[in-house]
Every structure is written in structure tokens, then in C-alpha cells.
């Protein structure tokens, strides 16, 4: 059991440190391999997120990667809606939370695929323009 908790921590830390949300890996590892309930896995993920986010934030501050003017509004709305989300999650069954999290992951995957296709299309168009300009010269 401890092995999978360490794996979840390592993967969640790496992904979270990159700013991509380590919970997308940590929560499935905890629920699938360690039989945590969805609500418990989300709680563990949130507690683990605190020190990971502080470390990542310090590094991003040092590298001047934080937009200070926009940060306060994001932090305020994030805190308010996380409170609402936590209250809502405590009133849902484990099976509903699992289904909602699965839908979230599926939606995230679809969005990422669409963005990748758009980016590839844009690169091909730019490459075609460059090739076209090269032939004119």
C-alpha cells in the first residue's frame, strides 16, 4: 500500500509542480489502487497540494512567472468557489463524485485533443506560408 502512496505523491508532485494539477493522477491512483473513497482521495489530494503548491509558487515567483495584478482576483474567486465545492462534495454520494470526476477527466482529455489539433493545424499553415514564400524568392 505504501508503494502506491509514494507513486501517487511522486507523480502528483511532478505534475503539480509543473502547474498542471497533480490531482488528475493522484486521485485515480488513490481510488483505483488504494481503495480510497472519492471524497477521501480528494481530501488527501488537497492536503498534499498545500506544500506542493507553496514550493512551486516560490520557484515561479523567483523566475518571475507570476502575474501579480491578476493573481488576487483568481485567488479570491478560487477560495470562494472551493468552499462551495467542498460543501457540495460533502453532500454527494461517492458514486456521484466518481462519475463527476470521470466526466471532468474525459472533458479535459477532449479539450486537450482539440487544442493539439488546432496547434498542429496552425503550424502546418505557417509552414505552408513559409514554403510558399521561399518558392517566390
Image (cartoon, helix red, strand yellow):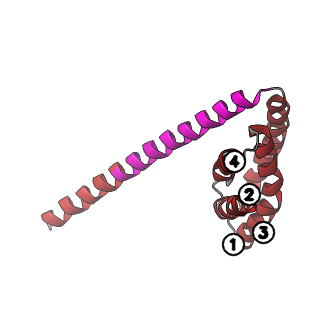
**Residue to which mark 1 is pinned:** 63
**Residue to which mark 2 is pinned:** 1
Q: Tell us which disc is closer to us: 4 or 3.
A: 4
Alpha carbon separation for disc pair 4 and 3: 25 Å
Residue drawn at (71%, 67%) of the image: 60
Q: Tell us which disc is closer to us: 4 or 2.
A: 2
Left or right of 2: which side holds 105? left
Q: Secondary structure at mark 2?
A: loop
Residue drawn at (73%, 51%) of the image: 70
Q: Secondary structure at mark 1?
A: loop
**Place of residue 78 in the rendered image (x, y in percent of width and height, measured from the top left):** 78, 43
**Foreground residue among 132 and 34:** 34
Q: Quadrant of the N terminus?
A: bottom right
Alpha carbon separation for disc pair 4 and 2: 15 Å
Q: How many residues crowd around disc 4 within 10 Å: few (fewer than 14), some, or many (20 or more)?
A: many
Alpha carbon separation for disc pair 1 and 2: 37 Å
Magenta includes 109?
A: yes
Q: Tell us which disc is closer to us: 1 or 4.
A: 4
Q: Secondary structure at mark 4?
A: helix
Q: Tell us which disc is closer to us: 1 or 2.
A: 2
Point out the residue furthest to the front here: 1
Q: Tell us which disc is closer to us: 2 or 3.
A: 2
Residue drawn at (54%, 38%) of the image: 106
Q: How many residues crowd around disc 1 within 10 Å: few (fewer than 14), some, or many (20 or more)?
A: few
Alpha carbon separation for disc pair 1 and 3: 9 Å
**Foreground residue among 91 and 5:** 5
- Of the numbered discs 1 and 4, the one sitting upstream in the chain is 4
Q: Are marks 4 and 2 in contact (CB under 8 Å)?
A: no
**Residue to which mark 3 is pinned:** 58
Magenta region, residue range: 92-120
- Of the numbered discs 1 and 2, the one sitting upstream in the chain is 2
**Residue to which mark 4 is pinned:** 27
Amino acid at each position: 500500500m505504501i508503494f502506491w502512496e509514494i507513486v501517487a505523491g511522486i507523480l502528483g508532485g511532478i505534475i503539480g509542480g509543473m502547474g498542471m494539477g497533480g490531482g488528475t493522477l493522484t486521485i485515480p491512483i488513490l481510488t483505483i489502487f488504494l481503495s480510497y473513497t472519492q471524497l477521501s482521495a480528494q481530501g488527501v489530494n488537497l492536503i498534499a497540494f498545500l506544500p506542493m503548491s507553496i514550493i512551486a509558487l516560490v520557484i515561479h515567483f523567483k523566475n518571475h512567472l507570476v502575474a501579480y495584478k491578476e493573481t488576487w482576483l483568481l485567488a479570491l474567486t478560487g477560495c470562494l468557489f472551493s468552499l462551495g465545492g467542498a460543501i457540495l462534495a460533502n453532500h454527494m454520494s461517492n458514486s456521484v463524485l466518481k462519475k463527476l470526476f470521470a466526466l471532468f477527466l474525459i472533458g479535459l482529455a477532449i479539450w486537450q485533443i482539440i487544442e493539439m489539433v488546432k496547434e498542429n493545424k496552425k503550424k502546418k499553415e505557417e509552414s505552408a506560408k513559409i514554403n510558399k514564400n521561399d518558392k517566390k524568392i
